[in-house]
Amino acid sequence: MAIHTIDDKEIESSVRAASELKGYFASRSSELGRKITYNLITYGCQLNESDSEKLAGMLESFGLVPVEIPAGSDHLIPADVIVMNTCAIRENAEDRLFGNLGVYKKFKKDKTVSFIAVCGCMMKISKNVDKIRSSYPYVDLVFDPQQLHRFPELMLASVAVKHQKIDIDNIDYLVEDKYLPIKRERRFRALLPIMYGCNNFCSYCVVPYTRGRERSRNFDSVRDELNALADAGYREVMLLGQNVNSYKGIDNEGNTKGFADVLDAASSIKAFSRVRFMSSHPKDLSEEVLSLMGERDNIEKHLHLALQSGSDRLLRKMNRPYDLKSFLDIADSFRKKVPGGSLTTDIIVGFPGETEEDFELTLEAVRKAAFDAAFTFEFSARPGTPAYDYEDQIPKEIVSERFARLLELQNDLAFKSNSALVGKTMEVLTEGISKGDDKIYSGRTITNHLVNFRADPEFIKKAGIADGDDLEGALIPVKIERARPYSVDGIMAGDIIR
Ligand code: SF4
């Protein structure tokens, strides 16, 4: 696949298309005597969330407003424009997408919905596109995730021709964020992709096929954006990429830069209380990055490093080029360089050919690494990946039984990790009011532990905080009082720090 870097000139046609769409929707709005709404439905990872922030920015630049989603609804409510940003990682993704598209059929028919677009990783898999072409003619636009910057042009073309437009190509685009309007989901957190795509071809994963080859953004451009985010008041920045540790950017002088340079640049900005990054591959994580994590106060003391299996034989079959020993060496180095830090992981249970012995090795690895938390998955065969065709698939009941054993072990470890915080006072970056109780706030420690806490009315009054303020983005000292399996409870223990 060719890599193509988008420049100022190329973005002009998108800007022109956005302006035409703005005019089009303005006249629709005056015909109807109301604002034109959109509902953007996002599945999947933080890179998809970041793409959706750009899609939302573009939709709002056309004059559209987000539809109101009542609390407790399933998000599938109608709006004039529906955009579904899909994910292809899990097996049930197809069922969910096509089921959800079915929900909108009647709304399209009675004209409650006037435009439906589908994008994201699933659209890079031809059988999904073929199915939309043959069975979902009421979908207006299909495009692949690399063509996000062309959304205005593609939407305009689709609106003009009034029949289904499908635009999937084989080019890996590299687009600087400065070209795209962004509507950030969080007031305090900025998602910042520093690279796109993946070259690793783990044998179970669709990402290299859907997101293309690795391409890193220009270093100076990333640094400029970091400064702009700090000036705009963001407290937390999350550096994103499928494999951030293999970032290979070039600065304007032509010097090669690595991920440690990006982390150094981000954490040198004092306005950021938290610098986070996701995801890391064990083969690329450097000691330099671990040292920076230990030295800089504002770098999250949390490393997410996917182990996937404790069996070297299975790691080779997964095309993961490390062994358990080298993984545990990194874990050890992290624990030494970042004392009190938290280590989390991903584990796949029931990869084709997994024997009871392989699985025992995974359990043993989990015990040795003492993960503070883990995302555990039952193996899900993805069409188009080598593992899909492996003949030694594991029966579902064996996978489920192993999964339950792993979960039990990991839950114990997570509870132990949470219990170690009880009695401590920790700075919590508040994310908002807890979903279940409007007297409880939730946020995260610098170790990424989830904290639910009560705010003492005295502190609230003293800090001049209005009733109902969700405190989003406030850094608050919280005394941890109780551990739960997936979170801790606490109470505000001092004035808001900033
Ligand atoms: S490193 Fe492996 S699992 Fe991660 S995105 Fe790349 S291919 Fe997928």
Image: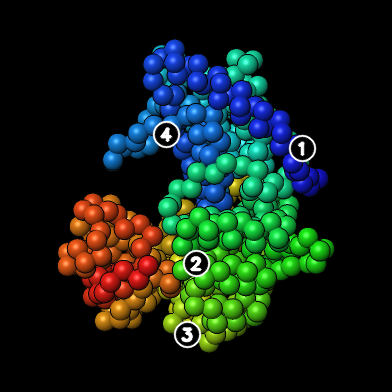
Q: CA distance from mark 2 to mark 1?
A: 34 Å
Identify residue type, mark 3: Pro
- Tell me the residue at 66%/76% (across/down): 286
Q: Which residue is mark 3?
A: 339
Residue 281, x across and y down, in percent:
63, 67
Nearest the eye: 206 or 233: 233
Q: Position of residue 26 (x, y in %)?
A: 50, 20
Q: Residue drawn 25% across and 59% down?
A: 465
Who's the residue at 54% across and 33% down the image? 61
Mark 2, residue position: 271
Query: If you read the primary sequence from the N terminus, does the residue marked by circle 2 or circle 3 appear first?
Result: 2
Q: Position of residue 76 (x, y in %)?
A: 39, 33
Q: Is residue 484 above or below residue 419?
A: above
At mark 1, the secondary structure is helix
Q: Is mark 2 within 8 Å of ligand 1?
A: no
Query: Residue tagged by mark 1?
Result: 9
Disc 4/disc 1 C-alpha distance (Å): 30 Å
> Which amino acid type is marked by label 2?
Ala
The residue carrying pointer 4 sits among few (fewer than 14), some (14 to 19) or many (20 or more) residues within 10 Å by Cα, namely: some
Q: Amino acid at mark 1?
A: Lys
Q: Earlier in the sequence, mark 2 or mark 1?
A: 1
Q: Is residue 237 among the parts visible in the rendering?
A: yes
**In the figure, 389 relative to 129: above or below?**
below
The vertical placement of 154 against 285, above or below, is above
